[in-house]
């Protein structure tokens, strides 16, 4: 009897131990723990887009999820439903839009980044004048170009608007007289090298080969392809087929003319691209190209005019903090380096462009102590070639200068501290008209895209 009781007790104890062990294992499994390095987790990777994407696959990739799809019905003039042909056309347009959007993403992913930024020098107030000053050398005016460059990098913040409907497909460029319409490249300021392809080539194949075709020294390089469907040149884009290519290097900018070293760098990059694409390149003569660059640089130097007027205090000096407050309230935008404020104005296409800048001596509004910094002179500087004549930029500068003078207890003067009179304005307008006519005769009106490229770094 004693042995039987002992066995029963031992069995009960063993059963309790098993139950307790199981409970301990369950609690241990549920207990949260820190993620260990040895945990076998799948790596995180960026989505990979195939360089060749079929339209139907592209449309599926960009198709919104079911929960976000909202049926959209266009208003019609009749009560009858859309016929099958209209529905088919709409589906084809949607697929084409999706394919073009995906092609843009592939182009951005395939194009190598170009790490170059031109750093300008601050323009001192004593360099601004109410009279026109022709530059003796185009390269000497590189410091005056900084405000034009910063205008591209410091666009004013636009107010937030309500969500707009999906953007419609951009129309193809219209060819004139049956000739391809250039997109960016312009024979007025570019040295153009045609590349004749033996067979059609896609943008997906071309883009990875253009890593060296970004800049040649300090000169910009552009590459465009001819699309037979649109009979137009366009920047090479993934997903498009091209009959021919053209590569161009800018002949001159505010850094000077294209030199022999930059030309050689450009030609070597073009030859490498032609070899990779089995294309034939029509290379120009170096001596002639460099001479054309120098001639264009000399012309640009004769037109590279900076026009300035000054607002001088009639009483006590102004603090930099006060000048900053006035400029900000007037809608001027501080440059990234903090040395000037810029007034922007929309051009005919609605794009905001720099019109003129405001400087307060050598004040840096980002680094200086604005309460301690003081002065009696504000300079308004107009970059004449970069402002379209139709906007009447000098008139705008003078009107703003008079507004500042009235509000701040000051007067508008030239660099010789002489008040600007009506006769001086008439003389300045006459000289400006001569300059505008000179640019127009060259085919580069002030403020146009080609002129902005020429008078930039």
Image (cartoon, rainbow, N blue to C red):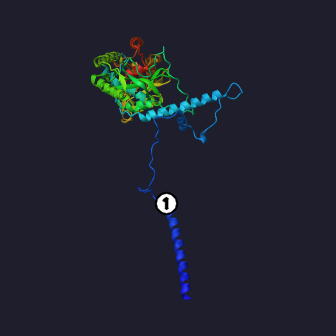
Q: Residues within 10 Å of mark 1 (few under 14, many from 20)?
A: few
Considering the image in quadrants, where does the N terminus appear? bottom right
Q: Position of residue 36 (x, y in %)?
A: 43, 57
Taking the view exactly as shown, the residue that stands out farthest to the bottom is 1
Taking the view exactly as shown, the residue that stands out farthest to the front is 198
Left or right: 20, with 199 as reference point: right
Residue 16 vs 115, above or below: the answer is below
Left or right: 394, with 251 as reference point: right
Foreground residue among 381 and 37: 37
**Badge 1 is on which residue?**
32
Q: Position of residue 364 (x, y in %)?
A: 36, 32
Please tell me which residue is depicted at 57% across the width and 29% down the height of the picture.
93
Q: Is residue 42 visible?
A: yes
Considering the image in quadrants, where does the C terminus appear? top left
Q: Position of residue 49 (x, y in %)?
A: 47, 38
Quadrant in which residue 256 is drawn: top left
Give SS at disc 1.
Answer: loop
Quadrant in which residue 405 is drawn: top left
Residue 230 vs 165, above or below: the answer is above
Left or right: 201, with 3 as reference point: left
Foreground residue among 261 and 362: 261
Taking the view exactly as shown, the residue that stands out farthest to the right is 79
Q: Position of residue 193 (x, y in %)?
A: 36, 21
Foreground residue among 285 and 130: 285
Q: Is residue 123 visible?
A: no
């Amino acid at each position: 009897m004693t042995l039987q009781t002992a066995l029963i007790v031992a069995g009960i104890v063993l059963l309790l131990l098993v139950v307790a062990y199981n409970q301990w294992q369950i609690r241990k499994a549920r207990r949260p723990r820190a993620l260990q390095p040895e945990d076998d987790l799948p790596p995180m990777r960026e989505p990979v887009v195939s360089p060749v994407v079929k339209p139907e696959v592209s449309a599926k990739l960009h198709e919104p999820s079911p929960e976000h799809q909202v049926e959209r019905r266009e208003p019609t003039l009749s009560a009858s439903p859309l016929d099958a042909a209209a529905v088919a056309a709409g589906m084809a347009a949607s697929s084409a839009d999706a394919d073009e959007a995906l092609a843009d993403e592939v182009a951005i992913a395939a194009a190598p980044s170009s790490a170059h930024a031109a750093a300008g020098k601050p323009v001192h107030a004593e360099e601004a004048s109410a009279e026109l000053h022709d530059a003796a050398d185009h390269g000497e005016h590189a410091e005056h170009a900084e405000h034009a460059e910063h205008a591209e990098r410091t666009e004013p913040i636009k107010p937030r608007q309500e969500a707009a409907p999906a953007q419609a497909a951009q129309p193809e460029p219209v060819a004139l007289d049956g000739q391809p319409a250039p997109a960016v490249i312009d024979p007025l300021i570019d040295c153009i090298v045609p590349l004749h392809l033996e067979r059609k080539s896609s943008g997906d194949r071309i883009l990875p080969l253009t890593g060296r075709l970004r800049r040649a020294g300090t000169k910009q390089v552009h590459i465009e392809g001819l699309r037979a469907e649109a009979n137009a040149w366009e920047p090479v884009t993934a997903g498009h087929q091209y009959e021919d290519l053209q590569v161009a290097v800018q002949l001159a900018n505010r850094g000077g003319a294209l030199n022999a070293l930059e030309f050689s760098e450009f030609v070597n990059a073009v030859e490498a691209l032609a070899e990779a694409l089995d294309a034939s390149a029509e290379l120009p003569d170096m001596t002639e190209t460099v001479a054309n660059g120098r001639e264009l640089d000399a012309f640009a130097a004769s037109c590279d005019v900076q026009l300035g007027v000054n607002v001088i205090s009639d009483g006590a000096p102004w603090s930099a903090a006060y000048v900053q407050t006035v400029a900000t309230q007037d809608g001027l935008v501080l440059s990234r380096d903090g040395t000037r404020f810029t007034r922007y104005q929309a051009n005919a296409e609605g794009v905001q462009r720099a019109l003129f800048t405001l400087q307060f001596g050598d004040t840096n509004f980002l680094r200086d102590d604005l309460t301690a910094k003081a002065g009696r002179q504000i300079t308004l500087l107009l970059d004449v070639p970069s402002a379209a004549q139709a906007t009447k930029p000098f008139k705008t500068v003078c009107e703003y200068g008079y507004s500042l003078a009235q509000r701040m207890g000051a007067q508008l003067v030239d660099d010789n501290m002489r008040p600007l009179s009506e006769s001086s304005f008439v003389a300045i307008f006459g000289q400006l008209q001569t300059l505008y006519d000179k640019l127009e005769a060259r085919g580069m009106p002030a403020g146009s895209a080609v002129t902005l490229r020429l008078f930039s770094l």
